[in-house]
Image (cartoon, coloured by chain):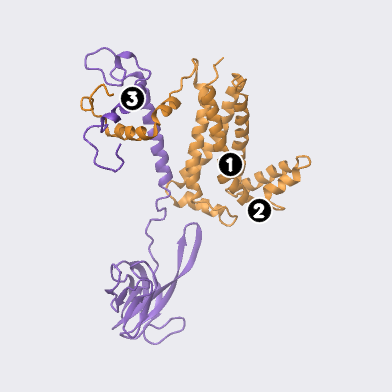
Amino acid sequence: MATTSPAARPRPRRASRLGDAIDERLDVRRPLVRFLNKPVPEGITFYHCFGGLAFFTFLVLVVTGVVLAAFYVPSPDHARASLAWLGSSVPLGAVLRNLHRWSAYAMVVLVVAHMVRVFVQGAYRKPRELNWVVGVLMLVMVLAFGFTGYLLPWDQKAYWATSVGINMAGSVPVVGPFLADLLRGGPTVGALTLLRFYAAHVFVLPALLAVGLVLHFAMVRRQGIARPL
Amino acid sequence: MTMDGSTPPATWPPCEECAAPASESDTSGANVSGSDATGADAGGAPAPAGAHGPVVSRGRFLKLSFAAAAGAIAATLGVLGLRPLIAPALRPQDADWVALGRAGAPAPGRAALPPKGAVARAAFTRDVADAYLPRAPQKTTVFVAARGEGRYEVFDSRCTHLGCPLVWDQATRQFQCRCHGAVFDELGEVVSGPAPRALDRYATKMKDGVLYVGGLEEA
């Protein structure tokens, strides 16, 4: 079977030996290599980086958000105090919170830039219409992330921005009042609103966006990057 | 193949049957590291000194650069994420001195301390900070042992085993833990049971006949 005796071949490094042992049992290396070493068409420019950069900001937001969740209290009694304490008394706390905030700003900008690139280059055309639809849905999710996250500091700016936003939702014909009540959880913006926005921000939206990202990337890998104009 | 966790042989793969698939994956592994290299340095092996061509192929250089950048970003995020979680309030707090009781006759607003040779349960209250919450009074239960001539020892009322509250048994003059049976004598030393060390003590000082307690000191 083997053309060379085992002793004649150079002994691999320890790490690759572990990799070999795993690969021998699960056969993961070839699919992984095929997935990671996908050829891209000629003419790819830095304009094609916006989507990947937006995904990178998402990773930063997940990491910082998980740690923030260990300090933030979604209650009108304690929201401001917990964030003030995070900023003043926790090592790197202020950096953590501001990185989350600025990454969120950057994500919105990058997502829009990505969308403009795809639109201008016509990369949304057949056969990639479905991926455009998933992308637009994810744009809505990203804006919902921003809207829900904005309330969490529970300061004046947050309170009134949310009031205005919910009133805008309330002006939708027919279903508006129902939508506003659903968002608010009561007659006025209050404790339930804060909890709802928090739950949406840390449980619902991340799960939805993760599903969207998997679909988005799977379709990109399936179809390849659109040939640039 | 063996799944029994025996010592791996000096060579890998361990047997002839395993050699075929392993060498196959070795080949694909070599293709990974030199995937976009020219034939001269396929396999990612450095060219011998003096040979033509780059020492590190372009593809391998880019791969290493990418790995270094990704590693730096991951390390930065890791530090940023873990540092706030590692005991944010680890800074030792200077415990305020708080009055526990008055020696001799009881006075208004001051509990009496036990007479010489006696051990008694006592409690004091002081403001304790808890993260973002405003400082709030916290009641602490202790045991006061009067040694005579104005000397007192103040023991923590928790067992040094796993922190259960202790009771003072007057008949045997012992501190007993109901959780796991640890027993301490009236000097706080371990008599029996699972306790790893003697009872913890509070710093004490006497001032104008009043006993003050400070920080907790581990035995």
Q: Is residue A49 rendered to the left or right of residue A3?
A: right
Query: Residue type at mark 1?
Result: Leu
Asked which secondary structure carries label 2, the reply is loop
Mark 3 falls within which chain? B
How far is mark 1 from mark 2, CA to CA?
Answer: 21 Å
Residue lying at the far top of the rendered structure: B52
| As drawn, B98 above or below A144 | below
Q: Which residue is mark 2?
A: A190
Residue A187 point in image, percent of width and height:
72, 53
Tag 1 and tag 3 share a subunit: no
- Chain letter tied to purple: B
Query: Residue type at mark 3?
Result: Glu
Q: Quadrant of the N terminus of chain B?
A: top left
Taking the image as drawn, is residue A100 in sight? yes
Asked which secondary structure carries label 3, the reply is helix
Q: Which residue is mark 3?
A: B24
Q: Quadrant of the C terminus of chain B?
A: bottom left
Q: Which one is in front, B201 or B151?
A: B201
Q: Is residue A188 rendered to the left or right of residue B14?
A: right
- Chain letter tied to orange: A
Residue B187 point in image, percent of width and height:
28, 77
